[in-house]
Image (cartoon, coloured by chain):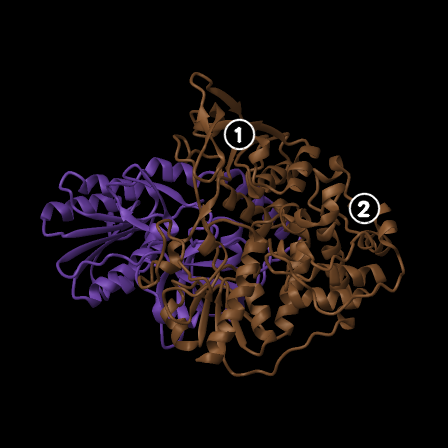
Amino acid sequence: MHKILSKRKLSPNVTRLDVLAERIAAIRLPGQFVIVRRGEGAERIPLTIADSDAKAGSIALVIQAVGKSTRELVALEEGESIQDISGPLGRPTELIESGHALCVGGGVGTAVVHPIAQGLFRRGVRVTSVIGGRSKEWVIFEEELRRLGEVVVCTDDGSYGRKGFVTDAVKDLLAAGGVDVVYAIGPVPMMRAVAELTRPASLHTSVSLNPVMVDGTGMCGGCRVSIGGETKFACVDGPEFDGHQVDFDLLADRLSIYRPQEQKSLARHGEACLIGLEKPKGA
Amino acid sequence: MLFFRREGTITLSNKITAKERLQINRQRMPEQDATARAANFQEVNLGFGEQLAMLEAQRCLQCREAKCIAGCPVMVDIPRFINYVAEGNFAAAAENLLRDNALPAVTGRVCPQETQCEARCVRGQKGAPVAIGYLERFVADWARHNEGSIVTTHAPRMGRKIAIVGSGPAGLTAAGELVRVGHSVTIYEALHKPGGVLVYGIPEFRLPKKIVHDEVQRLKKTGVKIECNVIIGRTYTLQDLRQRFDAVFIANGAGLPVFMNVPGENLKGVYSANEYLTRVNLMEAYDFPKTDTPVLAGRRVATIGGGNVAMDAARTAKRVGAEQSSIGYRRTRAEMPARAEEIHHAEQEGIAFEFLVAPLEVLGNAQRWVTGLKCRRMRLGEPDESGRRSPVPIPGSEFVIECDLVIVAIGSRANPLLTATCPELKLNKWGNIEVDASGMTSLPGVFAGGDIVRGAATVILAMGDGKRAARTIDVYLKRG
């Protein structure tokens, strides 16, 4: 059992839970994730470790509530517990030793890019973060990233920072030169667009893939992705890969496998909540 | 040929002559009706009752040199426990069985008895062998329901600590043996539930999860500690364990699915059997949306492979709603590695078999959903090094199995998660851990067994490894 030490809403559908997981907090490295299972009958969900506090023994999970499982997770309150957390999983990020890194985060991906920026900052690498959201209220982790370097905020509607997509800002920063590596994490179209921007100059661009997973240890092969024409398991070979080698079409396609089932589950969950059958805990 | 001369003489209380024993026919296992069961997940075999068990037990000739024991990887004293069953002394039968076998309710259900103990039974030379597996299952189930009446003895704790990696059949067996001789045991399990392949792989209708749960609880009561959600190679390294424990037994299984390596394998609707079965068994996707993990049901399901896993997948597909479920295998029925009973049950349930076929390509539609499996026919050629005749493609024999779900059940390999973090551990060319005759790896105090050593094998062979490793570890610790 993993007690929730604090809960904070970061945007209209993104919640941060700081959860007790001492061993993982002590050894996790940037880029690694955990598999979380709320309780009996619940799904196993992969979540990137956005931050950790080794002293408090806690890890930060940043959850975008989209389906039934994630909604139930964010319905948990401080003091309540998550039954199972296993990890840290996946290969840690390959961090450059020196130079200038561009960290690009879209939506909830900003939380995933944060530990990478943190790791780079601790090595003395210059970090510039480009983060974005639909509008001001959707921008997350700005404050945390500002502690690590310069931050360019973009909003689709221009309500905060620069108007437009993160890719526009990335384009300008690349044109200014001096960038040694790009870490881009967010929705599939965003990662693809950033990888296309850096491809002509062969500027190394690392992306983090989030396919459907079950065990997270390489046992099931459900998370297979195609990298440079070769099938890899994101859980053990990744989750970060060379963005220029990733088959993004396949990734997007495989992410859609369970969409009808997800909707069915969500609808059932919604009904149950309405008639009070299955009140999510703490609601 | 090995014989096991058994100590002491066993006298039968019910004075039944050998001739009378020979007149009793092998009792049939009561089973759920094939049509009904193909739509539910309840156990297929219903088990013997007391009368049926006693009758079957009387068929055993109580050979002085019992060949059946040599056929058992954990060397259960089969005639002894069967004799107690014949006498109706089920508690004594259970005490004896449990002394030899840590998980009899499991092996009584999943062992390939027809190639092991029952293959050696003298009664099989003329007619049917004694139904040893069914009797083992009967005794084990009796023991589960009458726990209080069984006496088990444990040596006092000696203060030596052993870590076991993986709570599958090898790990659980080793744990049971080690606590019995007085060691402290902690098992680390990567998943959220103990049991390994017994809970993620073998379906409910063949091995109810309640049975695995009960066996695990019984071990816990004897003092075995199990920590779930701990991945050795990630949460802790093997080096961490070596520092904290006096010995380590690695039994983390063959958890890396093998794919066919044909075009179209990443289309939507292609599963590894590992993923498909894990979703249904461990994650209980058959109860979706009551449970949260979905599985694609498929209307027409094609499974590729010839082992127990292929049978399990194809039969599961039928139960989650497939109209058609077929199995494609590149050799013939005679070469299928699956248990005879599983093939028989699959046929009864309407699973279609395509022999001598090999997959060439998974076909898909514009939305990249599976629409078929292109195969070609094979014929059996010359025997290969393993002595099995190898399949040879027949030119121009391509054809398509129309399906919307493909399940790949052609085996699994060693998962490198642990071994990759410990380069000193000697591996063979397939990535399996190398051990000496005693079960010790290239690292002192580190032992290994089960599928991580053998490649994908059986539950009982893994249990045999667990038992052997426990003995070696005990000797190693007492010497050290």
Residue type, mark 1 in image: Asp
Dots 1 and 2 on the same chain: yes
Taking depth in this image into account, of B325 and B462 the one nearest to the observer is: B462
Taking depth in this image into account, of A93 and B7 the one nearest to the observer is: B7
Colour chain B is painted in: brown
Residue B282 is situated, as x and y percent measured from the top left of the image, at 57, 52
Q: Write down which chain is painted purple.
A: A
Mark 1 and mark 2: Cα distance apart in space: 41 Å
Label 2 lies in what chain?
A: B
Element marked by disc 1: loop
Position of B305 relative to B194 (above/below): above
Residue A12 is situated, as x and y percent measured from the top left of the image, at 42, 54
Q: Which residue is mark 2?
A: B27
Q: Earlier in the sequence, mark 1 or mark 2?
A: 2
Name which quarter of the figure residue A8 lies in.
bottom left
Could you tell whether B435 is left or right of B196 in the image? left
Could you tell whether B416 is left or right of B410 in the image? left
The residue at 53%/43% (across/down) is B276
Residue B224 is situated, as x and y percent measured from the top left of the image, at 58, 72
Residue type, mark 2 in image: Gln
Closer to viewer: mark 1 or mark 2 = 2
Residue A110 is situated, as x and y percent measured from the top left of the image, at 31, 55
Q: Which residue is mark 1?
A: B404
